[in-house]
Image (cartoon, grey):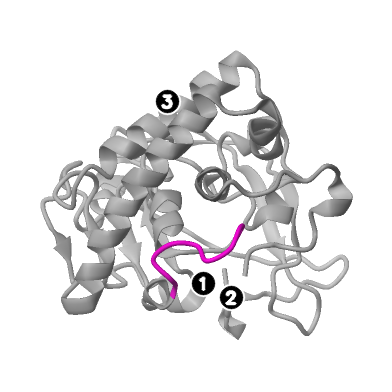
Amino acid sequence: MDNLGDAAFQPVAAGQSVHVEFDIAEAHDLSAGGTISIHTQGRIPFAWEGQKAIAGSLPYSSNTVETVINDTLAAPALLSRRLNKNEIRAEVSGCEGDKLEAIEKAVSNCRSYAAIALHAIKSGPSERIEEYFMDSSESTRETVAGVYERVHEQCSSLNSGAPASCADLFDHCEVSGALAYTHTGKTMIYCDKFFTMPPVPRKCRKKSQATTFLHETTHLQIVNRNRDLAYGYNNLRELTHEEAIKNADTYALFASASEMDCDIPSSRLDEGAEDDE
C-alpha cells in the first residue's frame, strides 16, 4: 500500500458515519440461494490527517445480518468473475515482454521463498516464529507449514496455479494504489506498481516482486484464503495469533526474514527502525 492516491482515502470525523454499498455476490458464490448469515471482521488501515503513509490499523467486527438470497439474481454476479473458470494458470494474460519476464521470475522466486519458509517453520528457532505468528507451538507450525506447502505447489511453474493477469480486470489498481490483488480468492492481478519493485528484497522487511507474489498466493482459496489484516512489519506485530495465521503479509515477511536471516528484535523497542517501504 505505497504511493496511495487521494481516491484511496476517506476522511472520517469523530462521530461521522460513512455509507458504502457493495455486492457480496461478486466476492462470494451465492448461486445456491437460501438463507445466509453475513458477518465481517478485520482491520482497517489508516493514515494521519494530511498524510498518505499508512500509520496503523484498527480492528472492527460487524453485527450479524441474516437474509434470504435469490439464486436467480445472485448467479449473474458469479458469472462476472472473469478468468475464474478453473484453478489452473493455463496462461498469464495481458503480460508481455518485460512484464512477462518479471512474472516468470516472481513465480520462481516465490517457490524458493516458500521452500525456505517451510524449512524455517518446521525446524527454525521459536523466536522467529513467535516474532511473526505470535506462537510457536506444534499446532501453529503445522498450520503454517501447510500454507507454505500449498504456496510452493502453486508456484511450481508459470503454467500451474491460479489464473493471473497484468490487466486491471476489476478496476482496483488505481483506486486502491495496490501493487497487486487477488479477486474472489481465485484470480491474481498484478498492477503497474508491481513492476517497479525489485525482484527480491534489497533489505530486511522491504517489499519485492517475489514476496508480493507469495503474499497474493496466500489469498487464494485453495491455499489459505488469507486476508489483509495488517500491512508492514510494525503493523503485523500488533496482530493476535489468530489474526497472524490468516494475514497475507505475515507469510510474505516471514519468508523474506527467513531467507535473509534478518535480526530478531530483542524487544518491541527494537522494531520501529526498519519497516516496509
- Eyeballing the image, is 259 above or below 231? above
Q: Is residue 88 visible?
A: yes
In terms of sequence position, does the residue under pointer 3 or pointer 1 come before the other?
A: 3
> Residue shown at 19%/47% (left/top)?
157
Q: Using the image as rendered, state which of residue 120 and residue 242 is in the foreground.
A: 120
Label 3, label 1: how far apart the Cα atoms are = 30 Å
Q: Position of residue 194 (x, y in %)?
A: 40, 71
**Residue 175 horizontal/vertical position (percent):** 49, 77
Whether the magenta-drawn stretch holds residue 200 is answered as yes
Q: Give amino acid for label 2.
A: Ala
Contact (Cβ within 8 Å) of mark 1 with mark 2 = yes
Callout in the foreground (3, 2): 3
Hey, which quadrant is residue 2 in on the image?
bottom right
Give the structural element (helix, strand or loop) at label 3: helix
The x and y percentages for residue 47 are 74, 71
Above or below, 67 against 189 in this view is: above
* Image vertical order of residue 141 relative to residue 259, above or below: above
Tell me the element at label 1.
helix
Specify the segment rendered in magenta. Answer: 197-205
Distance between the alpha carbons at the discs numbered 1 and 2:
5 Å
